[in-house]
Amino acid sequence: MTSVVETIAALRAQVQAWRAEGLKVALVPTMGALHDGHVSLMRAALERADRCIVSIFVNPRQFAPTEDLDKYPRQLALDLEKLDHAGVHLAFTPGVDEVYPQGFATAISVGGPSAGLETDFRPAFFDGVATVVGKLFIQAAPDLAVFGEKDYQQLCVVKKLCRDLDLPVEVLGSPTIRDAEGLAMSSRNAYLSAAELDMARQLNKVLRKAATALEDGADEASTMASARQAILAAGFDVVDYVEARESVTLAPWRKDRDGRVLVAARLGKTRLIDNVEVAAR
Ligand code: PAF
């Protein structure tokens, strides 16, 4: 049975008790609305650690005023059932005042991989993510933490956060879980109509085609232009970006380095992101 704690003090007490027993602790940070993608992160955590904590906190600091904070799906009872089923030991479900008490005035800003891509469209996003993830790492003091590769730029930013601030947490990226047609699992897929789901399923196909073209030596600018056209032709309204980047630093892609093609595109009111690997030549 998954235990549930809402306070930092109770979280710390539990982690200290585990540490006293010599147990290895993993953390999976989430905003809830759990799906199979999250469950795969929990499995990865449970394979590598003796105890798994899942935090569920819809972090207001990573939403712009125009974004879907109020609408973001919240389903705690269902989420707790999923944690129980997955064999998670502890759920940390703090309220906003527990994480950001009255007068909270500190932020963490990570450079390097946070430049461009998401930041061009959501300027405060990674400061919000880095601040809450930094706090969670200090609160839970896990040995390792697991993040999905679907949010690839976020994964790179969190790794950089740990490197630059000497946080002793091993950050593990876990492969994206997709449906049978390649659509990446996302809590925001719940917003899509049946017709939009069909269009959304084209996104990964376009990315894979672009990645294969780059691996075969195609020109980067024209490959990205064709990918943008194909995404619009699939029915997306706007392509925020579709770009090839180097896979660790997210610097501009070089043919001799492993890379990623990353995309963000909007379908109606829903914004989807995805990415695929590009092997070095
Ligand atoms: O990926 C998410 O769900 C969130 O950005 C995270 C890492 C839980 C921080 O709020």
Image (spheres, rainbow, N blue to C red):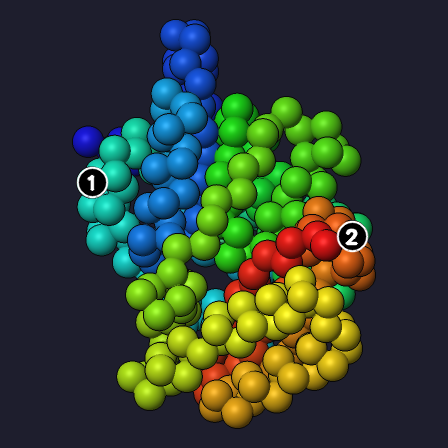
Residue under the point 67% across and 66% down:
216
Residue under the point 55% across and 57% down:
151
- Mark 2 / mark 1, whichever is N-terminal: 1
Q: Percent position (x, y) of residue 44? A: 40, 36
On the rendered image, what quadrant is the C terminus found in? bottom right
Name the residue at the front extreme: 216
Q: Percent position (x, y) of residue 193? A: 32, 84
Task: Tell me the distance, in whole angstroms, between the alpha carbons under discs 2 and 1.
Answer: 43 Å
Among the 4 quarters of the image, the one containing residue 90: top left
For residue 131, say whether it is visible.
Answer: no
Name the residue at the top extreme: 21
Task: Tell whether 48 sits left or right of 207.
Answer: left
What is the secondary structure assignment of the residue under circle 2? Answer: loop
Name the residue tied to disc 1. 85
Pointers 2 and 1 in contact (CB under 8 A)?
Answer: no
On the rendered image, what quadrant is the N terminus found in? top left
Residue under the point 67% across and 29% down:
167
What is the secondary structure assignment of the residue under circle 1? Answer: helix
Which amino acid type corresponds to the residue marked 1 in the rendered image?
A: His
For residue 258, say whether it is visible.
Answer: yes
Name the residue tied to disc 2. 256
Please say if 64 is above or below 28. below
Task: Tell whether 4 sits left or right of 11.
Answer: left
Residue under the point 22% across and 51% down:
77
